[in-house]
Amino acid sequence: MGRTKEELKKDILKELQEKSPIVLSRLFSMARKPKWNIFEQILSELEDEGKIEIKPHRIRPGSREVWLRIRR
């Protein structure tokens, strides 16, 4: 069974605190079948709470990777 939104939110924040900046696809692999809308909600909540900063980081031409950086 999948995790609740709160559990996923906690896991995402923990992962970000341990490895920042982090590539978004690495976070996606944390959830078995992530649904982007839930994931996006969690990320925007964390950003609203001032815990993370979402910005393109180390973007390579032609790459779809987006990096997240934790706000310290």
Image (cartoon, rainbow, N blue to C red):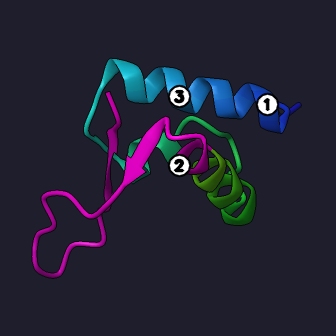
Residue on which disc 2 sits:
47
Give the quarter of the figure containing the C terminus.
top left
Residues at marks 3 and 1, CA–CA distance in whole angstroms: 11 Å
Q: Amino acid at mark 1?
A: Glu
The residue carrying pointer 1 sits among few (fewer than 14), some (14 to 19) or many (20 or more) residues within 10 Å by Cα, namely few
Secondary element at image label 1: helix
Q: Which residues are magenta?
A: 46-72
Expressed as whole percent of the image width and height from the top left, the position of residue 60 reads 11, 70
Residue drawn 89% across the image and 31% down it: 1
Location of mark 1 (residue): 6
Residue 13: which disc? Answer: 3
Place of residue 5 in the rendered image (x, y in percent of width and height, measured from the top left): 80, 38
Residue 13 locus on image (x, y percent)? 53, 28
Q: Is residue 3 left or right of residue 10?
A: right
* Picture disc at residue 54: none
At label 3, the amino acid type is Leu
* Circles 3 and 2: CB atoms closer than 8 Å: no
Q: Residue at x 50, y 20 (%)?
A: 14
The stretch drawn in magenta includes residue 65: yes
Residue 52's place in the image compared with 63, above or below, is: above
